[in-house]
Structures are given as C-alpha cells and as structure tokens.
Amino acid sequence: ADVSGISIDIEKNIPKAEKTNSNGIAVVIGNRDYSGDVPNVDFALRDAEYMKEYLIKTLGYRKGNIIHIENATLSQIKTAVKKLSNIAKKNQSDVFVYYSGHGAPDVKTKKSYLVPVDCNPNYIQIGGYALADLYSTLNEIEAKSTTVVIDACFSGSSAAGMLISNVSPIYIEVDDEALRTNNYAVYTSATGQQISAWYPDKKHSLFTYYFLKALQGDGDSNNDNKLTRGEIQTYLTDNVEYRANTFNREQSPQMLTTDKNQVVVQY
C-alpha cells in the first residue's frame, strides 16, 4: 500500500550530526519484492530508505559514500560488498552494513544466508549470499570500526510464511557467524528459531523501527547526550521484546561487540 502520506515519528526530527564522517562508507540494502513463491517483506524498502537518512543526517556519512540498493539480486549484493572493500580505508573508515529482507539457512550445513530477490531459498547455497562471505570481506578491510545491522531471521520461516519447502522451522538452528576485526558491533533482529516481526502501525519492521528510535535519541538512557552501543542494545532488548509480546510473538535482538561503551552518536 502507498504509505507516503502517513506520518511516522522516526521519520521526523532526525538528529543532525555535529560533523561529517568523510571516511564513513556504508552498504544499505532493502529487499521487499521477491520472485516466485517467496513472500514479500512489506516494509524493507522503507526500512532501508530511513536507515540511509539516519546515516547521512545523524551519523554524518556522505551521500556519495552510501551504496544503497533496493531489491538486490545476488550479483548486486556481491558487487556492493566488493565496492565497499575497494573504497574503505584501512584503519580510517567507519564501515556500516545494513540489510532488511529475508534470511535463510542451508538446511544441510546450517550456515546463514541473505536471500537476494532472485533467489529460491530451497537452493540457498547456489542463489544466496553467505553471511560468512560478508564477514570475511569485512575482516579483510580492517576498518576503523565496523557496524553490521541485519533485520532478517534465519530460521527458514518469516513473518509472511515459510521460505523453505517441507521443512519445519523448529528443526533449523543455524551456526553463528562472527566478525573478527578489532572494533565492531553486530546487531541482529532475532535469535535462533525466532521470526522477525513487522510493526504495521509504524510502517517499518519492529527491529528497525526501534533501532532508528534509539538513534533518534530515545536510546540515550542516562541523558548524557551520547548514545553508546550498549545503550542501543538495552533499548532494543527492552522495546522489541515487549512489543513482540503484544503481538503474541517472541523476538530477542542480539548484539556482539568489542566495546559496549563505544559512542555511536553524540547529540
């Protein structure tokens, strides 16, 4: 549905960065419109659009340093990650990767994959983009800092139905993938066999809505005008878990980081 005329709180009064992050490089992907029988991810494009807005306005990234793709194919995802690795400067760039769309497991290997819009999840090893490949590239960059935000679940199911034929999501538990750079934070929308929920009233996914709400300032729990990684984690856990419960769901966002006290935004 066209929601262009609807007023959403996180889409207004976006905080302004004190200075430009001239070396900041980002990849932002929103996958909504899937082919075949794969259900769409209704708010993925809107999620990605406003993540880009916050990167520019709140985190100070230059627009030209953000690789933004809507409805990315496998080739486009691979190309975006390669461009990122070519542009990013060792020990100088703050690297940021955001993905909203489907994730899926390889049932045999238990590895996690992002699902391009042209991918059949039953053949994810052929048509999907492995999280391990993304993390391997990010490790090689050796950036000043690396942030990965993934709004997808990897249980084989989704908010709109099953992605993989003839498999129950209760039997799928993917192996953890990990970054190994010196300074990183990885935020994921759900754990294990959970499903990432939507937040229809806000026209965003539940996780991305509260992630942006944290960046807007609500996550600054001690009101010191500084938002840390740990404060984002606490805010996501408290609000996503509570709101998911009101939808009769369980959803527990996760964060892995080298430093919970790292300041993300200074207001």
Image (cartoon, rainbow, N blue to C red):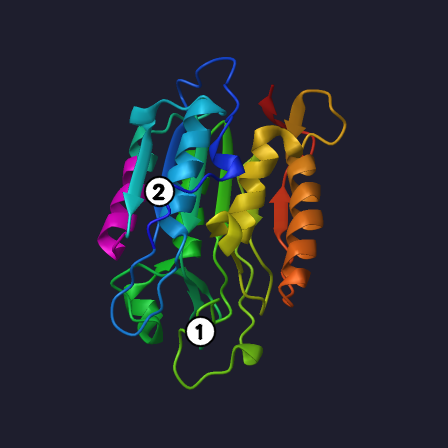
Q: Residue furthest front?
A: 5
Evaluate if marks 2 and 1 touch, with contact meaning CB atoms under 8 Å apart.
no
Left or right: residue 239 compared with residue 59: right
Q: Given the image, on which type of amino acid does mark 2 rest?
A: Ser
Q: Is residue 3 above or below residue 212?
A: below
Q: On residue 250, which mark appears?
A: none
Q: Given the image, on which type of amino acid does mark 1 rest?
A: Gly
The answer to whether one can see residue 179 in this image is no
For the N terminus, the quadrant is bottom left
- Identify the residue at horizontal 49%, vertical 65% (top origin): 154
Q: Which residues are magenta?
A: 72-83
Q: On residue 161, which mark appears?
A: 1
Judge by depth and name the residue closer to the eye, 156 or 200.
Answer: 200
Judge by depth and name the residue closer to the eye, 237 or 7.
Answer: 7
Q: Position of residue 176 (x, y in %)?
A: 56, 60
Q: Position of residue 206 (x, y in %)?
A: 55, 52
Q: Residue furthest bottom?
A: 166
Q: Is residue 115 above or below residue 141?
A: below
- Identify the residue at horizontal 52%, vertical 77% (top origin): 169
The answer to whether one can see residue 135 in this image is yes
